[in-house]
Each structure stands twice: as structure tokens, then as C-alpha cells.
Amino acid sequence: MHGLPETNHSELPVMAIEYAHVIMQSHMDCPASICPVKAQAKKRLIDAGRFVPADIPHIGF
């Protein structure tokens, strides 16, 4: 797609927070609803408090 190399969309056994950020950037064109590794990265960042989606009410920052 768009001249980019094929990427693996399968979930990983363990995902570090730093790698979750990389996944979110490298899978930018993938919808999290159909890309398992992006969904895993998004959940990892939400659980770590590093990502607050707009659909979850929050205050501050």
C-alpha cells in the first residue's frame, strides 16, 4: 500500500510501551478495529495512561 513494505498485523506475545508507540506510527493507515497489532498497541498505551482516546471522558492535560 502506498509503496510501503508489507507489515505484520498479528498480535505480539508481549508489547513494551515504547514499541506500542512505534506500532501506532507504523500502522497509522490501519484501522484499530481490523488491525490486531494496532488494537493491542492502543490498549497497551491506554492501560499505561499514555493514550487517552476522546471517547473516554477525562480532565486536564
Image: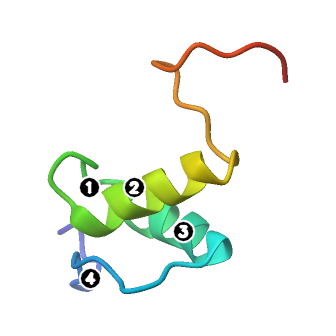
Say if 23 sits above or below 45 in the image: below
Q: Amino acid at mark 4?
A: Thr
Sort mark 2 into few (<14), some (14-19) or many (20+) by Cα contacts within 10 Å: few
Q: Which mark is residue 28?
A: 2
User: Which secondary structure lies at badge 4?
Assistant: loop
Near-viewer residue (27 or 5)? 27
Percent across and percent down for residue 24 are: 48, 60
Give how far apart the Cα atoms at labels 2 and 3 are: 12 Å
Residue underneath mark 3: 20
Is residue 5 shown left or right of residue 41? left
Task: State which quadrant residue 27 falls in.
Answer: bottom left
Sort mark 1 into few (<14), some (14-19) or many (20+) by Cα contacts within 10 Å: some
Say if 39 sits above or below 17 in the image: above
Percent across and percent down for residue 8 are: 24, 84
Q: Mark 2 vs mark 4: which is more N-terminal? A: 4
Q: Amino acid at mark 1?
A: Cys
Q: Amino acid at mark 3?
A: Ala
Q: Mark 4 vs mark 3: which is more N-terminal? A: 4
Is residue 7 shown left or right of residue 21? left
Residue underneath mark 1: 30
Task: Indicate which label's residue lies in the foreground, 1 or 3.
Answer: 3
User: Which secondary structure lies at badge 2?
Assistant: loop
Say whether marks 2 and 1 touch (CB < 8 Å).
yes
Q: Which mark is residue 7?
A: 4
Q: Residue at x 59, y 65 (%)?
A: 21
Q: Mark 4 vs mark 1: which is more N-terminal? A: 4
Percent across and percent down for residue 41 are: 45, 62
Give how far apart the Cα atoms at labels 2 and 4 are: 12 Å
Q: Amino acid at mark 2?
A: Met
Q: Mark 2 vs mark 3: which is more N-terminal? A: 3
User: Which secondary structure lies at badge 3?
Assistant: helix
Q: Mark 1 vs mark 3: which is more N-terminal? A: 3
